Amino acid sequence: GILAPAPGLLTGKRVLVTSGPTHEPIDPVRVLANRSSGRQGHAIARAAAEAGAEVVLVSGPVSIPDPEGVRVVHVETAREMQAAVDAALPADIAVFAAAVADWRVEAESASKVKKGEGGPPQLRLVENPDILAGVARRVDGRPALVIGFAAETDDVLGNARAKLARKGCDLIIANDVSPASGVMGGDANTVHLVSGSGVETWDRMAKDEVARRLVARLGEMLR
Ligand code: CTP
Ligand code: CA
């Protein structure tokens, strides 16, 4: 197969990528967060730009630099990410690599929560909007290709197939993120491409390489 996208493969195309975690505030000093580093999403944004696309990267809080040649919108929360995604559309391809927090605290405290006689605080959580599903289900202005990720610790392929159907996207990139996999925060990834036409498993490789191969594949799929 193709190892890297041909130069100019995505010239004239608009690509939207989400990446990183979201942070959901508990109070002014505390957040609910997750271990996503943003490496895979950022690598996809950069690879798309190298293939000639006009790229908007909507990124949650990460410690890695903005990729070159990409417009980056920095957000904190899932709701901010959703608003930034809506503002960045239309796009030809949308890749949702962010590890969006599934829940936020219903009522953020305006002041720092203190220890006290009441014991530990009971946090009431509410579900965040599903940004990917919202875009994939659009009637007007749906990107031609909507790509999701499925980070799983159990039954990777079963969960990925279910997500493909539930969210209405064209392709799910599934990976095993159990601690032993070293994927969270690491440089390498083993991914399964799950679509209506079946499952394709790629060898373990650097996240940059996954990104280049994925962009090459998306260019083919768009044709
Ligand atoms: N996603 C999203 N908005 C959310 C939750 C998830 O856009 N609020 C996107 C992710 O970016 C990813 C895909 O949906 O591309 C799957 O995310 P995942 O967390 O695996 O799926 P969930 O539907 O949240 O299911 P669960 O976490 O319970 O497995
Ligand atoms: Ca989730």
Image (cartoon, helix red, strand yellow):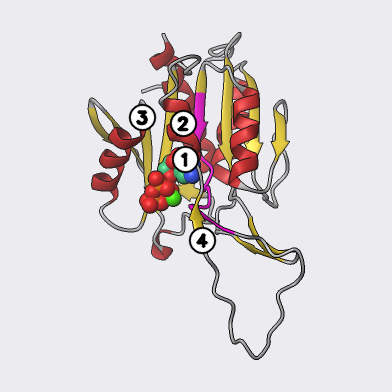
Q: Is mark 1 within 8 Å of ligand 1?
A: yes
Residue 171 is labelled as: 3
Q: Compare marks 2 and 4 and give the one earlier in the sequence.
A: 4
Q: Secondary structure at mark 4?
A: strand
Q: Nearer the viewer, mark 2 or mark 4?
A: 4
Residue 180 is labelled as: none
Q: Compare marks 1 and 4 and give the one earlier in the sequence.
A: 4
Q: Compare marks 2 and 3 and give the one earlier in the sequence.
A: 2
Q: Residues within 10 Å of mark 2 (few under 14, many from 20)?
A: some
Q: Does 46 appear above or below 102?
A: above
**Magenta span of residues:** 94-106
The alpha-carbon separation of the residues under discs 1 and 3 comes to 16 Å
Q: Nearer the viewer, mark 4 or mark 3?
A: 4
The alpha-carbon separation of the residues under discs 2 and 4 comes to 21 Å
Q: Residues within 10 Å of mark 3 (few under 14, many from 20)?
A: many
Membership of 175 in magenta stretch: no
Tag 2 residue: 134
Q: Secondary structure at mark 2?
A: helix
Quarter occupied by residue 54? top right
